[in-house]
Amino acid sequence: MKTRNLFFDFDGTLTVIENIVTSDGKQTAKPIIPQENFDALLEAKERGYQLFLCTGRAKGSLKNAFVRYPLLKDIPWDGMICGASDMWYHGNRIAITYFSEEECMKWIDYSVKTKSEFHYNGTESWENISFQMMDDENEIEAIKAQVREWLVTNPMTNCAVVPAVDFKFAPNSRATVINMPTYSDIFAEGCNKGSAIQKFCNLIGVPIEQTVCFGDSGNDIEMFRTCPTSVCMANSPEELKALSAFVAKGKYGVAEGIRWLLDQEITAFDS
């Protein structure tokens, strides 16, 4: 008997943008985890699938997400991969790769040079530093000292810069840089969502052939290349659609993809 294993990107995959009526009666567009996706995840779990979150968010950032998205904490996750390097299985950390101080400071210096925003993604919290209007050398050095403290108390697994990296000014870094339309994800050396899933499966003893991944954007490409079956959201880039076994048609792509799996009789247990 073989158990199927589903890996889900978070932002833009599990979540969708809905028009929400606020307490003062105004409408606003807000990302939520829709009930349709939540119910489909529960159905998959009941059918014996293992559910894994595979997000570019670090563990510290994910803490905020569990507060912001109430349904997220109610999903019966078997494990999660945070920032393509911090791996958890049944509540226990099984592997982690940290950014070195040297690599971190290279990207701080890049952000200073290009007047970018630097997003520090730590295991305990997420921090945002804007260098857009910063010219005071003493202020910059004070921030670098603060970052060095964070590297001890809130180790960094990945970071991001806004806008996307201009490779003319990029440092000589071993990090994995994935440019998105408006920002760049920067993962530790050798880390991306695909390599993370492969390592995770090796650690928990799951054949990669039994994995299915769900995603919507450029930082999901490597996991789509790694997993034999992939499901992408309707608004995914064409490169991701080309790697997909199933392309959702509507906004609740996770629900569509899970129902497609069940309709294809790719059940949780194969004889």
Image: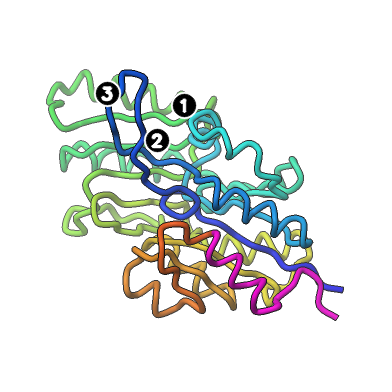
The one of 240 and 122 positioned closer to us in this rendering: 240
- Asked if 26 appears above or below 260 in the picture, the reply is above
Work out whether residue 30 or residue 168 is closer to the camera in this orientation and state it.
30
Q: Nearer the viewer, mark 2 or mark 3?
A: 2
Q: Picture quarter containing residue 153?
A: top right
Which residue corresponds to mark 3? 141
Measured as percent of width and height from the top left, residue 59 is found at 55, 38
Instruction: Label 3, secondary structure: give it.
Output: helix
Left or right, residue 213 beside residue 101: right
Callout 1: few (<14), some (14-19), or many (20+) C-alpha neighbours within 10 Å?
some
Residues under numbered marks 2 and 3 in contact, where contact means CB atoms less than 8 Å apart: no
Residue 6 drawn at (x, y percent): 64, 62
Quadrant, the N terminus: bottom right
Pointer 2 or 3: first along the chain: 2
Camera-nearest label, 3 or 1? 1
Amino acid type of the residue tagged 3 in the rendering: Glu
Which element type, helix, strand or loop, lies under badge 2?
strand
Q: Is residue 164 above or below residue 28?
A: below
Magenta highlight range: 255-271
Q: Which dot marks residue 120?
A: 2
- Residue 260: in magenta span: yes
Question: As rendered, which of 154 and 52 lies closer to the eye?
Answer: 52
The disc, 2 or 1, on the residue closer to the chain's N-terminal end is 2
Q: Name the residue under label 1.
A: 150
